[in-house]
Structures are given as structure tokens and as C-alpha cells.
Amino acid sequence: MLRPAISVKFGRKMMYVNSLHELQQHLGLDKIPIPEQVLEYDNMLESKNRSGRRKEKDGEASPKDGGQGSGARKRGLLPPATQQFGVSLRFIYDNNKDLVGLIPPVVRQCVEFLSQPDALETEGIFRRSANVTVIKELLRACNRGEPISFQNDPHNAAVLLKTFLRDLEEPLLTFDMYEKIMDFQTWSPQEKSRKVKYLVREGLPLVNYKVLKYIMQFLWKVQDRSCLNKMTANNLAVVFGPNLAWPPNGQMTLQAIAPINAFTDYILENQESIFII
């Protein structure tokens, strides 16, 4: 009898990545010599992906808008009030006046599900991928304002949370902060303490501040169980950093990832002194 080339158990451990930016979550690419042509091609892919997401936000039919299609945006109409993906935090706030603590419904649902002990202790949480079809269905349900079921799979909730952050019209750490974040690694320890507090407290809109605080407090719980889930603060920063900040043109370079991840790691490690309200 012919046997499979790889075992089922090994197959479950395999991960598929679409770009160097995704691979960066698993390998320290700054220590690997990568040909210039590969870097240029990766930047081209990332630019196309960002452009595609912007087109979807402008109204082209996509799973993200729950099948609302291009007509609404092209006619100058707003997305449905229930939309949560591919819009701004302000849009979500304006259409959900009963938000608890200014936290978008999908963010709260993901965090509350993942805060259960079994989910928190899931090995590789936020690093493992999820079924693409399932995630698309969850996106559609969220955008239609329907109840969502994570099918008892923590990876579905984890991927949905990262997708929400990545698809915001403007990153949670806003475009105005981007150049300052790029300088983060040049600051002295004293400057980091002072400047990061100022940027987060004074530089972010209130809703961004509240959502960032909510997510960081949750991620602290995740890293507190790193002996089980293998997700240290540094690992979480690598996974979340590129989903929290990117340049206005949408073209993230590999050189930009290091300061973004370091900035994210610093906020996570020092959140008690950074978030005061």
C-alpha cells in the first residue's frame, strides 16, 4: 500500500504564508540575507493587497462587506450600519451608540471568547492559521450584524481579531504616529518612557486609546500563560505589530517591521504605567 508523503500529524503543524511579512511572524528575517529582487517582489505583493483592500472599502463586491457590493459606495452611500470590517473606528462608534467602553462588538466577542482558560492556553494562539472559508463566513455574519459562532475553535477568534485590526481604514496606531514609531529604537530608555506615554495618551483619538488598552490588557493575559501557549510578549508583538501600524501608502517594508514590533512589545510590557484611564 502506498503511504502518504507526510503524516497527518505533521500536516497539521504546517503553515502557509503569502508574503515575507507573514513569514516574519515565525522567523527573524532581519538575520537572513534576502535577495533584493525578492524584497521588491514582496513589496509589490503587499502594495497590491493593500490596494485591493482599499478598493473593497470603496464599494467593490467582497466577502468583507457581507455581499453589499459596489453599488452603495459608488453611489456615495455609506456602508450598512452593521458593518465592522473595512471601516473606521469612528464609523463603528457612530453606528453603535450603546458600545460598552467604546469597544467594537467584534473585538469584544473575540476577546471574551479567547479569555476562557482553555482558549488562553491554546498553543500557538495568534500564530496558527484558520480555515479561510470559516473566516469569510464569520466576516459576513459580523458585517450583517448577526450573532457569530467561533465553532469552539480559538484560532477562528484569534484570526478574526487580527483581521479586524488589519482591515481598519486607518491603523489603530494612527498614520500620524507612524514616523515617530519608526524612530522608536533610536530613543534612550528615558525617552522611550516619556515619548511612548505621550504618544499613546495624547496622540491617539479616545476610541483608539480605549481599543488599544483593551487589547493590550487581554494580550497580557495571553503572555501570562506563555508556558502553555508559547506566546511570550515578544512573540505577540511580532504577530500584532504589523496589524497595529502601517504607513499611509500601505507599503510596509521589512525594515519597518522591527521598530513597529519593538514599539508594540514596549507597550505590552509597560501597559500598567502607560494606560492610566
Image: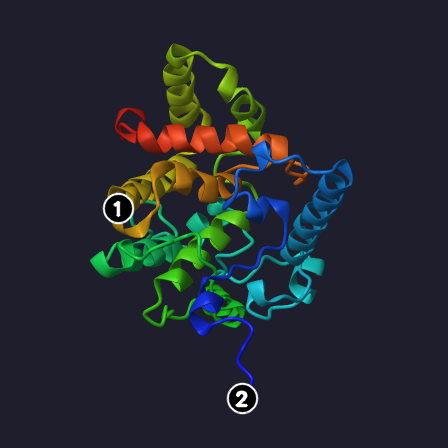
- Total of numbered circles in the picture? 2
Q: Callout 2: 10 Å neighbours few (<14), some, many (20+)?
A: few
Amino acid under disc 2 = Met
Tell which residue pokes out farthest to the left in this image: 117
Residue at the location (46% across, 44% down)? Answer: 239
- The reply to whether residue 199 is visible in this rendering is yes
Residue at the location (57% across, 32% down)? Answer: 31
Question: Residue 273, position in %: x, y?
Answer: 27, 24
Which residue, given by chain and number where applicable, does mark 2 sit on? 1
Which residue, given by chain and number where applicable, does mark 1 sit on? 227
Q: Is residue 239 above or below residue 61?
A: above
- Residue 101 lies in what quarter of the image? top left
Residue at the location (52% across, 25% down)? Answer: 181
Q: Nearer the viewer, residue 157 or 55?
A: 157
Labels 2 and 1: the sequence-earlier one: 2
- The reply to whether residue 247 is visible in this rendering is no
